[in-house]
Image (cartoon, grey):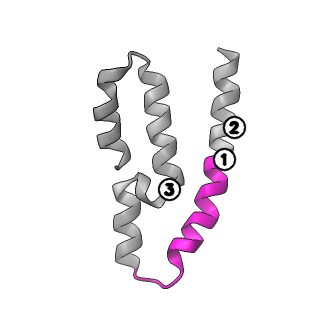
Amino acid sequence: MSNVPANILLAEFTSDWRTLAWGVSVGGLGFMLGSLANLIALRLARQPGLWKEFHAWSLPLFAVSLLLGGWLNALH
């Protein structure tokens, strides 16, 4: 499921909108299937090996974002 529909679906189950918004945003950042924009761009490019290159960049950035978000959340 893409990050925007996930946010809409999960909004009914929590009042902590900041954590929900952060979670779906980071999820869309880190994974090809996490964002419809990622899927569209990768499909339109039709470049062999592009999905592997995308994840070579996005997964480390996802990990850094996850750690930074956890650290910032701990400060609250």
- Across and down, in percent, residue 36 comes to 34, 56
| The image quarter in which residue 37 lies | bottom left
For this orientation, the residue located farthest to the front is: 13
Callout 3 amino acid: Phe
User: In the rendered structure, which segment of residues is drawn in magenta?
Assistant: 46-63
Q: Residue at x 71, y 28 (%)?
A: 71
Report how far apart the C-alphas of labels 3 and 2 lie in the structure: 16 Å
Q: Which mark is residue 31?
A: 3
Question: Residue 61 vs residue 42: left or right?
Answer: right
Let me know if residue 53 is in the magenta part: yes
Instruction: Say whether disc 1 or disc 3 marks the residue closer to the N-terminus.
Output: 3
Residue 28, how many percent across, how many down?
A: 45, 49
CA separation in Å, label 1 and label 3 = 11 Å
Compared with 35, 6 (above or below) is: above
Q: Kindly identify the amino acid type of the residue bearing the numbered disc 1.
A: Ala
Is there a contact, CB below 8 Å, between mark 1 and mark 2? Answer: yes
**Residue 65 location, quadrant:** top right
Based on the picture, tell me whether residue 76 belongs to the magenta stretch: no
Label 1 packing within 10 angstroms: few (<14), some (14-19), many (20+): few
Name the disc covering residue 63, or none: 1
Looking at marks 3 and 2 on the same chain, the residue that comes earlier in the sequence is marked by 3
Q: Position of residue 42 (x, y in %)?
A: 41, 71
Looking at the rendering, in which quadrant would you find the C terminus? top right
Q: Residue at x 44, y 29 (%)?
A: 20
The numbered disc on residue 67 is 2
